[in-house]
Amino acid sequence: MANRELPQENQAVEPLFTKKKLSNDLLVALAVGCFIGFLAPFGMDRLPVWLSISYWVFTCMVGYFIFTPMVYFGNLTLGNIVTTHWHRVAVSALLASVLMSFAVPVITWLFFSQPIQFSKQFFAVFPKAVVIGGVITFISMVRDYIKAQQQQLSESSEQLEAHQQLLTTTEKAGADKIMQQLPVEKRGELLCLEMSDHYLKVYTDKGHHLILMRFKDALTQLTDYPGLQTHRSWWVATEAVTSVTKENRKVVLQLSNEVSVPVSRTYLEAVKNAGLT
């Protein structure tokens, strides 16, 4: 009596049965049947335990193949009439309980040769079918809802990770172009740039080196890189800043390579907005 249909608000419709779902659900039905059979409710405590368990396992299996299709197709077909997913499941489970109330007398006859009298047995079985089937369906709904949320969270995490990787790739693209102009032994993590006439002094965690490049062109390449211009002739990577010192009215950034970078009044506001002061 399980509902394997996931909430339509969170996930696309799954097939009614798959090999994995069927095996998992039948194991649940088996466990529930064994549990109820061991408890031997409704006066079945006078029967041998094996017979009570066999009866309830078989009943739960039949119930599964009644409730699952009813809830599955009911959830699909009632979508335009009943807008709330939980309400659709409740209506479908109620209809499934009606069918189950006709199935139980047949099962009882098969096991105990008890005469079938639908007119009397239906009203005796229906409340029990509603309670047992409803509880199991509710538990299954909660399980499927949690599964859907976990899948949605996993997909969101994957999308976020892919987006971060894309940003990282974009950020590194400009820096990589600059690194390609450095000697291999000087290539590393970009820390800062210093304009020197028509040359550009590139500082990395491996040292520094002069390359022939305009400061303006370098800034254009580093548009997406986490850093900012602090002076008309200086640019620093945000991660390279270790501390800030103030001498009179002058602000100086101390970098991880022990280089001191001046901050001019023109760029002081940008430095403050970056949280570096």
Image: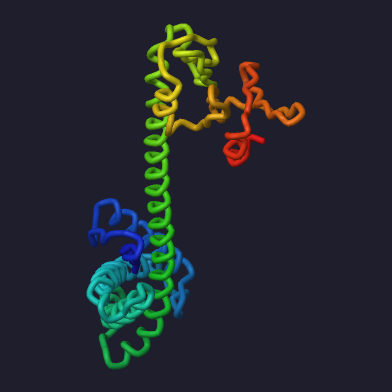
Residue 90 x %, y %: 36, 78
Residue 51 x %, y %: 37, 67
Identified at 39% across, 65% down, the residue is 140
Q: How is the image coloured?
A: rainbow
Q: Nearer the viewer, residue 261 or 240?
A: 261
Evaluate whether residue 101 shows in this view.
no
Residue 260 x %, y %: 65, 20
Q: Nearer the viewer, residue 113 or 63?
A: 63
Q: Quadrant of the N terminus?
A: bottom left
Q: Is residue 109 above or below residue 274?
A: below
Q: Is residue 170 above or below residue 273?
A: above
Identified at 38% across, 80% down, the residue is 130
* Quarter of the rendering containing residue 32: bottom left
Q: Is residue 215 above or below residue 40?
A: above
Q: Nearer the viewer, residue 203 or 150?
A: 203
Q: Quadrant of the C terminus?
A: top right
Q: Nearer the viewer, residue 231 or 37?
A: 231
Q: How many marks?
A: 0
Evaluate whether residue 218 shows in this view.
yes
Outermost residue on the bottom side: it is 119
Identified at 40% across, 36% down, the residue is 167
Identified at 23% across, 59% down, the residue is 15
Outermost residue on the right side: it is 248
Q: Is residue 31 above or below residue 204?
A: below
Horizontally, is 251 left or right of 13 in the view?
right
* Quarter of the rendering containing residue 87: bottom left
